[in-house]
Image: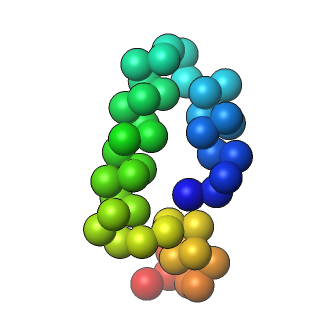
Amino acid sequence: MHENYGDWLRRAVPSEATWRTKLSELRRIEAIYGDVDALYDQDELQA
C-alpha cells in the first residue's frame, strides 16, 4: 500500500467507518497477494 493511501482514502470516503473498512479490506488482500502497488507496477493489471 502506498504510504499516502490512508490519508487519501480518508478524504475520499464519507465516513470513518467506511475508511476503516476499506483499509482493512486492502490489508487482507495484501496479506494474501502482497503489495498491490508493486503488483500493478509489474504488469498494470494485464495478468
Q: Compared with residue 45, is residue 12 higher up or lower down, i.e. above or below?
A: above
Left or right position of 11 against 35: right
- Taking the spot 58% from the left edge, 67% from the top edge, the residue there is 37
Left or right position of 10 against 20: right
Q: Position of residue 21 (x, y in %)?
A: 37, 32
Q: Compared with residue 29, is residue 37 higher up or lower down, i.e. above or below?
A: below
Q: Compared with residue 46, is residue 7 higher up or lower down, i.e. above or below?
A: above
Q: Compared with residue 9, is residue 34 higher up or lower down, i.e. above or below?
A: below
Q: Position of residue 36 (x, y in %)?
A: 50, 66
Report how many numbered discs are placed on residues in the image. Answer: 0
- Taking the spot 58% from the left edge, 75% from the top edge, the residue there is 38
Q: Position of residue 28 (x, y in %)?
A: 31, 54
- Taking the spot 50% from the left edge, 14% from the top edge, the residue there is 15
Q: Quadrant of residue 5?
A: top right
Q: Quadrant of the N terminus?
A: bottom right
Q: Quadrant of the C terminus?
A: bottom left
Nearest to the observer: residue 35 or residue 46: 35
User: How is the model colour-coded?
Assistant: rainbow
- Taking the spot 50% from the left edge, 81% from the top edge, the residue there is 46
